[in-house]
Image (cartoon, coloured by chain):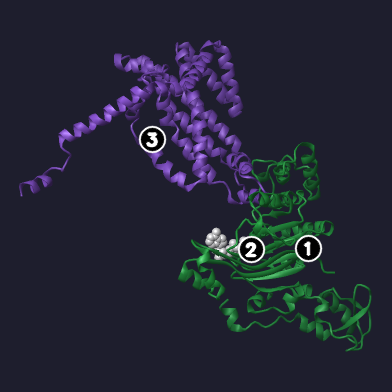
Chain colours: A green, B purple
């Protein structure tokens, strides 16, 4: 079940300012972001980040604007240099790469999709998709064939000769996605890649990404400030605030066991009926008398409600993928699952 | 007591004698320098002279209709606008009809060489300024001086060093005309979208790949605006340059001033204006054309 760790971040700190190293010890001793800014005129970007990212999964990093998401993701390919800490990819310390090695690493191991697309406006769709390959020195027919393959894959066939400004936002980001996939890197970084798109287009793009991921099994680090997006595509979710990790877990962990009021606030408005899975609320096997159709553990509350209502005992069995009975769910369980965790009133007001 | 009053009444200037000595020392120093090194510096500019003469001969010795056809073709390539092309043909016909063909060719050749030189030196310098804040801090005040210093002033050392002729004239024109190209290259490269640059970095582009694949192409509309301004300024210098021996449309204008010949002055002046309009329209149309796909639509 569990895959090896692809990216590992250890004790990472990032401070912006004139002389970050000189104020690092204040931050290590727990000085807060506002205090650091006021007393030492430095901006705290990230503090004591420890994070493991599993290979072949989609790992979402979430947080409000300014929480340090972009700063964090740019450390993975060293677009930003850390003030302190280690970045290990496949066990190798990225900080030890020299300039030439870093370029090779970026060409072949890690690629990126940007919020505002970052396409080359003077090049056609074909040339944009082939950009990473061209940088590797690939030319001629091979370049064309490999670019065409990804143009087709993201559904842009027929638009090869168009320029980015002639395309809608959603189509431009497909170009960005195709460009990132074309280099066949194992790691894909996506910094709010869908945030600039309209909600309907955004959902489309999520679907495209999930479909591609079914065959490609990339290690994807996906940044978003949108919880619905995080829950839809994330295998695991890390939540940042003021440059620190405040919770790291599966989507069900975040929804059922929010670590603090900040996260409770985040999950306040989600549709729990759709998000919460039976596995998160079921009772022990045999704790109630079941009848009627059993339900799969990964289904959600909305699916379970009519089935439980139809059951004469108001309780149905929960089964795993193999049809093995692993628990029971009652209408009471569903009701309490629907209820959102209370947020302390004061915390909400001053959020 | 008396002394104190005097510095209140009159500015405490340097003694006249001292000033004269200083002037003499600087002037004779520079004269000696130009006597010693003038020939070497002249020799260094020899290839430039060869290039100038070659381009002038080329334009003068080619039959007029071929030159006209070539000009029309270049204008078409640059602007893709039939009105501009027709305007160019009509203007040159008129210029030829009024007997100004040869001088126009000389001026055209001078402008072309000057623009080539300005691009050859101005673009790399602009790029350097964009890459380094230090370079920008050093070059910007020099450009300010180049643009505000009256051109006659820097004609003096140029003429002292190189005498009168095509090369000193050309150098004076380039000094006057190159600053906007340098500034706009610098600006254009600094304004390149940060996210596009970041994308280029993220895909492992080298500095060279970034410069030629992203920065210069994206800065090109601004660089073209710089080229346009450089050409306009070079044309504005045509009459001044003719004072130190640059042949072309400037000389008849100069002659017309000296001899009070209104018609001669106006006709040659109009020919310079026609050249300016043509260069302006073609470079601007080209600039717009390369920008077509770049304006952010959203
Ligand atoms: N180059 C920089 N210089 C100074 N402060 C920066 C810089 N980049 C980011 N920051 C600060 O770091 C914090 C995190 O920024 P960012 O990573 O962009 O957040 P997010 O992507 O989550 O919106 C913000 O407070 C921001 O102002
Ligand atoms: Mg961001």
* Mark 3 lies on residue: B146
User: How much space separates mark 1 and mark 3, taking CA atoms?
Assistant: 60 Å
In the image, which disc is placed on residue A325?
none
Given residues B8 and B196, the one toward you in this image is B8
Asked if the residue at label 2 sits under 8 Å from ligand 1, the reply is: yes
Discs 1/3, front = 1
* Mark 1 lies on residue: A55
SS at badge 1: loop
Chain under numbered label 1: A
Q: Earlier in the sequence, mark 1 or mark 2?
A: 1
Given residues B193 and A208, the one toward you in this image is B193
Where's residue B137, x and y in %?
Answer: 43, 46
SS at badge 2: helix
Residue A118, can we see it?
Answer: no
Q: Residue at x 49, y 38 (%)?
A: B125
* Mark 2 lies on residue: A72
Q: Is residue B292 above or below residue B202?
A: above
A197 left or right, relative to B288 = right
């Amino acid at each position: 079940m569990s895959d090896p760790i692809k990216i590992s971040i250890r004790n990472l700190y990032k401070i912006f300012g004139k002389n970050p190293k000189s104020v690092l010890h204040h931050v290590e001793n727990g000085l807060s972001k506002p205090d650091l800014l006021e007393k030492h005129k430095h901006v705290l970007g990230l503090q004591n980040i420890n994070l493991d990212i599993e290979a072949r999964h989609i790992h979402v990093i979430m947080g409000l604007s300014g929480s340090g998401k972009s700063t964090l993701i740019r450390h993975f390919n060293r677009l930003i240099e850390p003030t302190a800490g280690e970045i290990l990819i496949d066990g190798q310390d990225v900080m030890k790469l020299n300039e030439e090695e870093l370029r090779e690493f970026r060409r072949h191991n890690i690629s990126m999709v940007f919020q505002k697309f970052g396409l080359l406006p003077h090049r056609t769709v074909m040339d944009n998709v082939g950009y990473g390959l061209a940088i590797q020195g690939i030319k001629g027919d091979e370049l064309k064939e490999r670019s065409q393959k990804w143009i087709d894959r993201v559904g842009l066939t027929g638009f090869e000769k168009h320029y980015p400004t002639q395309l809608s936002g959603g189509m431009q980001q497909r170009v960005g996605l195709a460009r990132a996939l074309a280099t066949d890197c194992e790691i894909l970084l996506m910094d709010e890649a869908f945030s600039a798109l309209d909600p309907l287009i955004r959902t489309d793009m999520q679907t495209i990404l999930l479909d591609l991921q079914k065959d490609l099994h990339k290690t994807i680090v996906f940044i978003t400030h949108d919880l619905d997006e995080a829950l839809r595509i994330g295998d695991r979710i890390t939540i940042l605030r003021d440059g620190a990790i405040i919770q790291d877990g599966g989507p069900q962990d975040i929804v059922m066991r929010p670590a603090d009021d900040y996260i409770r606030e985040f999950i306040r408005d989600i549709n729990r009926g759709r998000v919460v899975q039976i596995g998160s609320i079921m009772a022990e096997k045999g704790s109630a008398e079941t009848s009627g159709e059993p339900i799969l553990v990964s289904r959600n509350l909305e699916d379970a409600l009519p089935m439980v209502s139809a059951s004469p005992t108001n309780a149905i069995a929960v089964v795993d993928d193999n049809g093995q009975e692993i628990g029971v769910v009652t209408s009471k369980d569903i009701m309490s699952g629907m209820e959102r965790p209370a947020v302390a009133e004061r915390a909400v007001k001053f959020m | 007591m008396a002394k104190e009053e005097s510095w209140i009444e009159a500015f405490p200037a340097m003694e006249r004698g001292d000033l004269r000595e200083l002037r003499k020392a600087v002037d004779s120093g520079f004269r000696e320098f130009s006597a010693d090194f003038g020939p070497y510096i002249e020799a260094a500019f020899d290839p430039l002279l060869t290039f100038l003469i070659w381009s002038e001969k080329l334009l003068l010795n080619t039959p007029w209709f071929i030159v006209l056809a070539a000009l029309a073709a270049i204008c078409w390539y640059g602007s893709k606008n039939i009105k501009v092309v027709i305007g160019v043909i009509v203007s040159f016909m008129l210029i030829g009809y009024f007997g100004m063909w040869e001088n126009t060719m000389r001026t055209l050749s001078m402008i072309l060489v000057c623009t080539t030189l300005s691009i050859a030196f101005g673009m790399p310098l602009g790029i350097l300024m964009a890459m380094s804040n230090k370079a920008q801090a050093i070059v910007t005040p020099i450009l300010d001086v180049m643009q505000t210093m009256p051109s006659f002033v820097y004609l003096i050392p140029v003429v002292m060093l190189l005498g009168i002729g095509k090369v000193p004239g050309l150098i004076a024109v380039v000094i006057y005309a190159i600053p906007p190209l340098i500034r706009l290259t610098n600006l254009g490269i600094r304004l390149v979208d940060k996210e596009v640059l970041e994308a280029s970095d993220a895909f492992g582009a080298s500095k060279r790949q970034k410069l030629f694949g992203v920065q210069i192409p994206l800065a090109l509309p601004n660089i073209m605006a710089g080229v346009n301004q450089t050409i306009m300024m070079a044309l504005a210098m045509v009459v001044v340059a003719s004072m130190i021996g640059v042949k072309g449309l400037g000389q008849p204008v100069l002659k017309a001033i000296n001899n009070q010949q209104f018609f001669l002055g106006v006709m040659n002046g109009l020919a310079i204006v026609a050249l300016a309009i043509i260069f302006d329209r073609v470079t601007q149309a080209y600039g717009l054309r390369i920008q077509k796909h770049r304006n952010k639509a959203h």
